[in-house]
Image (tube, rainbow, N blue to C red):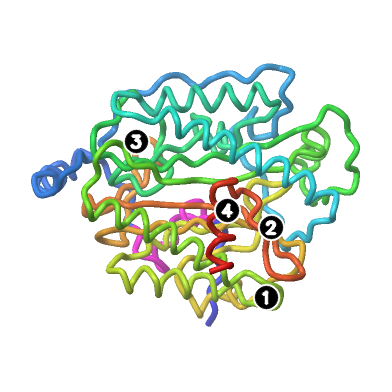
Amino acid sequence: MRINLTYCIYHASKASKVFPVSAFSKIESRYPSVNDINKRHKFSLVLPHKTTPVKDIQDHIRKPPYAFTGVVGPKPLDIDIKTEEQIAVMRDTCQLARKILDSAGRYLKVGVTTDEIDEVVHQMCIDNGAYPSPLMYNHFPKSICTSVNNVACHGIPDLRPLEEGDMINVDITNCLTAQENTHDHWPVYDSVVTKCWKTIYKNGVHGDVSKTYLIGAVDEKGRQLVEVTEKCLYAGIAQCRPGQKFLAIGTAIKDLAKANGFSVIPAFCGHGIGHEFHTPPEIIHIPLDGCESQHVTMKEGMTFTIEPILSEGTDMIAILEDDGWTALSEDGSRSAQFEHTVLITSEGCEILTISEEELKRERKKKDA
């Protein structure tokens, strides 16, 4: 029997019967094992820290419905095929997300808190007329996700200063809006919330990108983990073309990770993106042959994210009961993540969130 998943496994009630995701657990019960692991590594294990209040968004910034309620409406069931006009808007949004990520990366250094990075990104979004998509999405309290060391995903920016040897993933998603309502052709789904999407966020689209950064001197194993994770992202992207099954992405990522001695954390998926933050297709980063959605083939005009998380230890995670978001590795091991938003084209795919530096690097590889 085939199994259908829904976007991020965490938001689909943890899918504990499909993937090795533990039940919610309090961090206090994990202190003994955490402290023991800490003695054997050259990095600090990250534990819950103080946070600051939720930031306001000025009235002139158009907001998605969840910005007011924290409640995300029903997801569409079908994969959206973008028009040329929609793709043009997505290119602008994705490039803005990339520029903000690169700017945020320049602030990262020992002593800076992730809350300060959140403040910088939040203001850059506002200055560019964009809404920081994570803010209030299912009540997420910040404008970005910052996942340090043993935090695999969805880390909440806080007042912990970054330390020498830290590895931090910064995940940025923004929705760029325009002041004039000109895109009446955006899909409208049969729900009050998504109709409200169309009214309030009529031509807004999301752009999603992330990168893992090294803070100061990181040990060789950590540097290798980051390097291989980025290679896994591009191995998955290399599979993207019309007619290819989505299953090929997870196969390529899992094979490369395993060959280098790392495990893929399967509990979080890539996802379709555009007018909505999370839509079909589900991009599972391991080959899950029994999942029906992975046998769907790619078509020109599809846009989605690929965002593998690799671990130097277990592929099992636990989500903190206190905040309902922070995903920690079960054994305290570090993880790394890279993400791009891609567009399927007639000849293969286009990376919408690629930086100029990455673009030059990829061109050199092709010419070699």
Residue 146 pos. (x, y %): 41, 37
Residue under the image location 71 percent in, 17 percent down = 59
Residue 303, disc: 2
Residue 20, disc: none
Query: Which residue is identified by label 4?
Result: 360
SS at mark 3 in the image? loop
Choose between 251 and 316: the one closer to the eye. Answer: 251
Query: Which residue is identified by label 1?
Result: 297
Residue under the image location 30 percent in, 26 percent down = 160
Going by the image, does 38 lie left or right of 353? left
SS at mark 1 in the image? loop
Three-letter residue code for mark 2: Thr
Choose between 132 and 327: the one closer to the eye. Answer: 132
The segment highlighted magenta reads 8-21
Three-letter residue code for mark 1: Thr
Residue 60 pos. (x, y %): 74, 19
Three-letter residue code for mark 3: Asp
